[in-house]
Image (cartoon, helix red, strand yellow):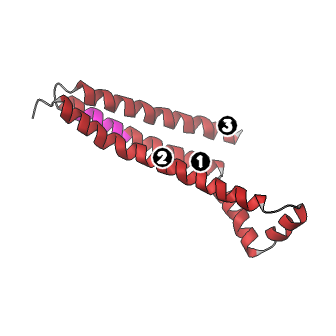
Amino acid sequence: MNHITNTDAAWIAFAVLFPVILYLVFSGYQTKQRMSVRKSILDKFSRAEDFATFLQTPSGQRFVAELSDSETPARTVMSAIQRGIILVLVGVGVLWSGVKIQSTAEIATLGGLLLCVGVGTLVSAGVSYRLSRS
């Protein structure tokens, strides 16, 4: 198995990139839906007194707890670190398989790109962490 065709390389690239793209799209859709629900809840209150009354109920307290838990800087940084590590590992794996199977520059290039995206995500998480500390 020293030779791989362009068709095989395309299928391998599809098998690697499709789950990553699907995860990113699904994650973005989930975040958009969550924000839409929060916005619609806030839009229901026409006066500040109504909103203050809502916040004193158990439902209002859960709403505030969800807002504060889901968007903490630590959680955002940890999520970026997790994504970065996964991308780095996938990139290294694809790069290694592209180098191991000779004459597959396409796979090695795909691995290099995934590795760069993963490292970029980790650097971004590091910068976000440093900014959140100051």
Please say if the residues under marks 2 and 1 sit with CB atoms less than 8 Å apart.
no
Front of the two marks 2 and 1? 2
List x then y, in percent, for residue 69: 65, 59
In front of the other: 30 or 120: 30
2 vs 3, front mark: 2
Secondary element at image label 2: helix
What is the crowding at mark 2: few (fewer than 14 residues within 10 Å), some, or many (at least 20)? few
Is residue 91 shown in magenta? yes
Q: Is residue 42 left or right of residue 71?
A: right
User: Residue 88 lies in what quarter of the image?
Assistant: top left
User: Which residue appears at 32% of the width and 36% of the height?
Assistant: 92
Secondary structure at numbered mark 3: helix
Q: Which residue is mark 2?
A: 25
How far apart are the alpha carbons under marks 1 and 3? 12 Å
Graded by Cα atoms within 10 Å as few (under 14), some (14 to 19) or many (20 or more), the crowding at tag 3 reads: few
Measured in 3D between alpha carbons, the distance from the residue under mark 2 to the one under mark 3, in whole angstroms, is: 27 Å
Q: What amino acid is found at the position of numbered circle 2 in the picture?
A: Val
Q: Which residue is mark 1?
A: 76
